[in-house]
Image: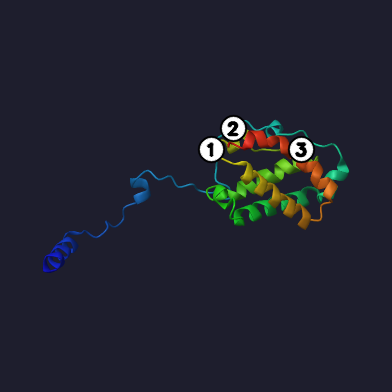
Amino acid sequence: MALFSTASAVLMLLQQAPAQGIDWDAEFGVERKERDPITGEIPVEPYEQSNANAGASPYRDENLARDFGGQGGIRTIASRTIELSEADPRITAIFASHDMVRLKRTLGEQLCYILGAGCNYSGRDMRTAHAAMGVTKSDMNALVENLQIAMKEAGVPFAAQNRLLGKLAPMTRDIVAR
């Protein structure tokens, strides 16, 4: 026991205090992502922006966009869907390392474009955006359930919900990896 105490005391004396003033992130090459002061988003590498990246052609029915509350209602539904998904234990890990500000904006743009509410989509195509996530069919089902909850909370008629889901469903093949 005395040997252990002596060895512990020697080790404690040999330990150095952490160096002051060293930027350990810089020392080990950890990149800090600074948010844009205007948008609050983390900048991304440039890519070709196109409405074709939205994954579906837009509806031309003005009533459909109105059923979703127009652009404001659609943004609210997109934001709520992401909030529900972040809190959903089934899929929260998928969202942990993502820029939620950007995701809420681009999902809102995508839904707004598809619903024919007069928005342009500035996000990546579905295959590229989800390439490294390893999204499963179960993950996708959980997200859709959260979207349905958000649409129900917003008072979107069931038939209108189904029309949107009909446009989104084919994207599953570009999103689900396994």
Chain-order first, disc 1 or disc 3? 1
**Of the image marks 1 and 2, the number of the one nearer the N terminus:** 2
Q: How many C-alpha atoms fall within 10 Å of the one at disc 3: few (<14), some, or many (≥20)?
A: some
**Numbered label attached to residue 167:** 3
Q: Residues within 10 Å of mark 2 (few under 14, many from 20)?
A: few
Which residue is at 37% across, 49% downward?
25
The image shows residue 1, relative to residue 16, as above or below, that is below
1 vs 2, front mark:
1
Dot 1: within a 10 Å radius of its alpha carbon, few (fewer than 14), some, or many (20 or more) residues? few
> Relative to residue 6, is residue 42 drawn left or right?
right
On the question of residue 38 being in view, the answer is no
Q: For mark 1, give the secondary structure.
A: loop
Q: Quadrant of the C terminus?
A: top right
Three-letter residue code for mark 3: Lys
**Which one is in front in this view, the residue at disc 3 or the one at disc 2?**
3
Is residue 160 visible in the rendered image? The answer is yes
Residue kind at label 1, given as amino acid type: Ala
> What secondary structure is marked by label 2?
loop
With respect to residue 73, does 173 lie above or below?
above
Q: Which residue is mark 1?
A: 132
User: Distance between the Cα atoms at labels 1 and 2?
Assistant: 17 Å
Which quadrant does the N terminus fall into?
A: bottom left
Q: Amino acid at mark 2?
A: Tyr
Residue 165 coordinates in the image, percent (x, y): 76, 42
Closer to the camera, 12 or 7? 7
Nearest the eye: 178 or 163: 178
Checking the image for residue 110, the label placed there is none
How far from the left and from the top, in percent, is residue 128?
59, 33
Helix, strand or loop status at disc 3: helix
Report which residue position mark 2 lands on: 47
